[in-house]
Image: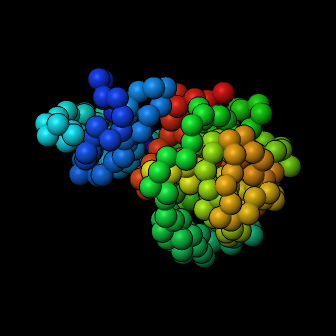
Amino acid sequence: MQGEPVQIIFFGAKDPSDIVSLTANGVNLSAFIYNNVVQAVYGIDLSHKLGQFPIVATLKDGKTVIASLTVTERKKPTLAFTIPGKLGGTNPVGEQNVATLLTKENGILANLTTNPKKLWTETFRYPTANPVVTDPYGYNRDTGTQTVTHKGTDFRAPQSTPVYAVNRGIARLVYKFSIYGNTVVIDHGQGVFSFYMHMSKTSVTEGTIVAAGQKVGESGGTGYAEGPHLHLTVRLNGTSIDPMKFFELYGGK
């Protein structure tokens, strides 16, 4: 459904090079090996058009394989939400401030580059030692005249709880945002990113290799947060998808 990752498996293929080109709904994807199986992963956007769309692969032997995927609707409940006083409070001024800052910060996050090669080999792991979801992915937060969609998963994490990299990659961004707070973004290659937000402190240096399970920071309540927690976002080729569904496909331990 909308907001979920799609695993595309090539039965019989022995190497990613067997797949010359691959598109899902016109988006170029890269094949890789996971659990000795050649595959790719595609993210369905929360606002993706409903119905069928094509997955087209050109193989090394010259053949073209076409499959179709049906996208179904995700119900997106709307809940009332407040704006912290540090961002202007729940009023027109605060709402406009949040909207302006979100546009600026999302623009920065949208321009991150990805390594063309897959940087991970292990299964993905949860970002906290005792993962408990306190706020799920995919619902709308209504502050009055503005609606913000929650495009990540919040984990229970009291102040200064260690936060770990879900897998190996490059620390593509380490930055303190007004909305997202202290943030680390890890590029896992081939368009797969993980975002760790609202932390009290960060523990990695931008541009360095981060190992799977390495501490990247400590939880907190910086930015648009009413209390300490960890917000985790997973993006596939620029699309934020449900992290818990991604863990179902590629690990979660």
- Colour scheme used in the picture? rainbow
Instruction: Locate residue 7, reporting x and y percent.
Output: 38, 33
Is residue 174 something one can see in this rendering? no
Relative to 8, 192 lies left or right: right
Relative to 176, 148 lies left or right: left
Residue depicted at 72% across the width and 57% down the height: 198
Taking depth in this image into account, of 30 and 251 the one nearest to the observer is 30
Residue depicted at 78% across the width and 42% down the height: 157
Residue depicted at 47% across the width and 44% down the height: 241
> Which residue is situated farthest in the right direction here?
160
The correct choice, above or below, for 34 with respect to 84 in the image is above
Instruction: Locate residue 203, reporting x and y percent.
Output: 79, 57
* Figure quadrant of residue 3: top left
Instruction: Locate residue 234, reporting x and y percent.
Output: 54, 47
Instruction: Locate residue 185, reporting x and y percent.
Output: 62, 57
Taking depth in this image into account, of 89 and 215 the one nearest to the observer is 215
Relative to 144, 161 lies left or right: right
Quarter of the picture holding the C terminus? top right
Taking depth in this image into account, of 165 and 71 the one nearest to the observer is 165
Tally the numbered discs. 0
